[in-house]
Image (tube, grey):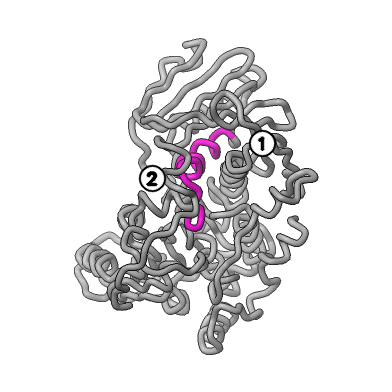
Amino acid sequence: MFGIVATLFSPPVNSERKTNHLTTKENSMITERTTLTRRGLLRRLAGAAGAAVAAPYVIPGSALGAEGRPAPSGRIAMGTIGVGGRGRHDMQALMSNDDVQMTAVCDVRGDRREAAKKLIDKKYGTTDCKTYIDLHELLARADIDAVLIATGDNWHTTAAILAAKAGKDMYCEKPMSVTVAEGRALTDTMERYGTIFQCGTQRRSVPRFKFAVELAQSGKLGKLKTLYAEMAPGEWFKHHPYATLPAQPQPAREVVDWDRWLGPAAWRPYNATYLTRGFWMCNLDFSGGMITEWGSHTVDLCQWANKADDTGPVEFELAEGTVVARYANDVKLIFEKGKWPLHVRFVGTEGSIYVDDDGNIEASPKSLLAGRTFGKGYPQANHVRNFLDCFKSRRRPIAPAEGAHRANSTSQIANICVQLGRKLKWNPQEERFVDDPMADRMLARAMRQPWRF
């Protein structure tokens, strides 16, 4: 897909191939489990057939649950990788389902590991939850069926690819990648391994957002003309997009494993400010700034409305004080300056629809709503449940890797347009710019050893 860029990120063709970020012992542990367990075999059969060919095999657990819960052999044993604020929220949403047993947590920060363990042990009335600094150790456990990945954006792709190679299905937070090339590598890996991947773009499972998309797809708005995708409030980047900070004394590994926090990102001396979301989220070494923070939701909904889950715009330019993109079908995508609440708007020749996180939904003509009422907020209960049901059925979830990648890559290309300050032409089939080698070089980043995949 990417020519030279793609060769740097191509996933392996089979689970026995060793990866260069693992020790011989770690490779042996993961390979043995992914090739010999019944669960691993069933996953490969399911992936090859592309259909629901087998029910999941869940190993018996030792944790005791409340009365009425499924027997241990009927529960999905899960681990969580990344247990900051969002990670703990996701983890609790998963644990609210009786057929989930959270058994382990992994985080490079000691305070977060211990806080998450306390939540899990309190939930189940045990002290069984295991904690890890190194995600390889969690992934090597044969008794874990699936994982939640809620690290910082910098780690999403690498952690997801490692999890797929270890035979785990996953619910992975957005945005799923830092670069276009990483997103393609993640998507291709999920397909090759038959992995159930649900991106944490939970608005796909919120009724009022789904209703707006259905109106657009059904033709009730007429021919789609313009899609408005909001980016998060604030500047594109709050500071220089590759800013570095002065060195501070590095804490002990048990407090913060700094080397693993950096992971695939370029090395730099420790500074506690890097750990704050407000800094790393606006640094292109670790994330994609304001546009991928909300664009992974809003662009995702716009792409879905335009039936573009497997493609993207063909042109990007600076206009109207922001980035405006155009699809091959002449639909425009406008990246709106952010303001709360998060929202999208779809405009067609016969009508329009606006919907936001506060529960506001406005349509023209008003008859499109036909007395419908919807709730507020953006709860993820339905989204989590969809993932768990797909784990069992082996069906594709509502927010699969390909669609999430296309939405996120559209946001990433908008970032490139801003950085270069000029119009760009994009080939969504080849996932390369048209006759623009300078822009092509921005589709990938150098990934630090030993965390290349």
Task: Using the numbered discs, state the Cα–Cα distance from disc 1 to disc 2 in whole angstroms.
Answer: 38 Å
Residue density around tag 1, few if under 14, some if 14–19, many if 20 or more, within 10 Å? few
How far across and down, in percent of the image, does residue 137 sit? 43, 79
Above or below for 326 versus 390: above
Q: Secondary structure at mark 1?
A: loop
Whichever of labels 1 and 2 marks the residue nearer the N terminus, that label is 2
Q: Which residues are magenta?
A: 284-302
> What residue is rendered at 64% in x and 22% in y?
224
Could you tell me which quadrant the C terminus lies in?
Answer: bottom right
> What residue is rendered at 60% in x and 26% in y?
319
| Residue identifier under label 1 | 422
Task: Choose between 4 and 400: the one closer to the eye.
Answer: 4
Task: Choose between 212 and 290: the one closer to the eye.
Answer: 290
> What residue is rendered at 66% in x and 35% in y?
316
Which amino acid type is shown beneath numbered disc 1?
A: Arg
- The numbered dot on residue 380 is 2
Which amino acid type is shown beneath numbered disc 2?
A: Gln
> What residue is rendered at 57% in x and 50% in y?
400
Residue at the far bottom: name it: 25
State the image quarter where residue 245 is shown: bottom left
| 286 drawn magenta | yes
Magenta region, main secondary structure: helix
How far across and down, in percent of the image, does residue 324 sit? 61, 29
Above or below for 225 versus 188: above
State the image quarter where residue 235 is shown: top left
Task: Choose between 271 and 288: the one closer to the eye.
Answer: 271
- Report if residue 86 is visible in the image: yes
How far across and down, in percent of the image, does residue 108 sit? 36, 70
Q: Secondary structure at mark 2?
A: loop
- Report if residue 101 is visible in the image: no
State the image quarter where residue 300 is shown: top right
